[in-house]
Image (tube, rainbow, N blue to C red):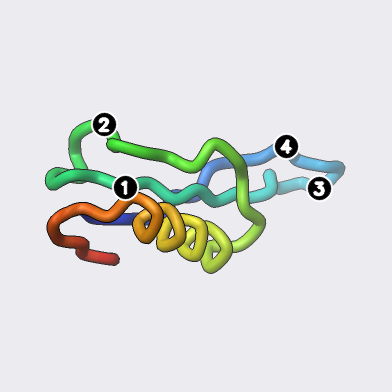
Amino acid sequence: MRMRVIAIKGPPKGRPLPTLLYRAQAYKADTHEAPSWECDHDHSTPLEAHDCGKEWLQRNPMAETDLR
């Protein structure tokens, strides 16, 4: 499994630029296909999303993991 963190635009919250929110995604092989899993909640930092993805991978072990 491969894991990545993506950034998505959040609500502007009164700022000129939208807030960035982060989510972890896990893929079986090709990151150009739909993810096998995506966290169903937003994180305020990439590290929080990465940690969420690592926890999910630990709870759902596969044959081989590649944390990117």
Which is more foreground, mark 3 or mark 4?
A: 4
Among the two numbered marks 1 and 2 on one chain, the one whose residue lies closer to the N terminus: 1
Which percent across, then down, holds residue 58? 37, 60
Please name which of the two marks, 1 or 3, marks the residue nearer to the observer. Answer: 1
Q: Position of residue 25 (x, y in %)?
A: 37, 46
User: Going 31% across and 55% down the picture, which residue do you hit?
Assistant: 3
Say which of marks 1 and 2 sits in front.
Answer: 1
Q: Nearer the viewer, mark 4 or mark 1?
A: 1
Distance between the alpha carbons at the discs numbered 1 and 2: 9 Å
Q: Secondary structure at mark 4?
A: loop
Q: Cβ–Cβ below 8 Å for labels 3 and 4?
A: no
Indicate the amino acid at tag 3.
Arg
Q: Quadrant of the C terminus?
A: bottom left
Q: Secondary structure at mark 3?
A: loop
Say few, some or many: other residues with alpha carbon within 10 Å of mark 1 (under 14 / 14 to 19 / 20 or more).
many
Which of the numbered marks, if any, corresponds to residue 15? 3
Q: Which mark is residue 26?
A: 1
Q: Secondary structure at mark 2?
A: loop
Q: Please, what is the three-letter code of the amino acid marked with disc 1?
A: Ala
In the foreground, 44 or 51: 51
Amino acid found under the numbered disc labelled 4 = Pro
Q: Secondary structure at mark 1?
A: strand
Label 3 – label 2 distance at C-alpha: 32 Å
Q: Earlier in the sequence, mark 3 or mark 2?
A: 3
Which amino acid, mark 2?
Ala
Q: Position of residue 7 (x, y in %)?
A: 50, 49
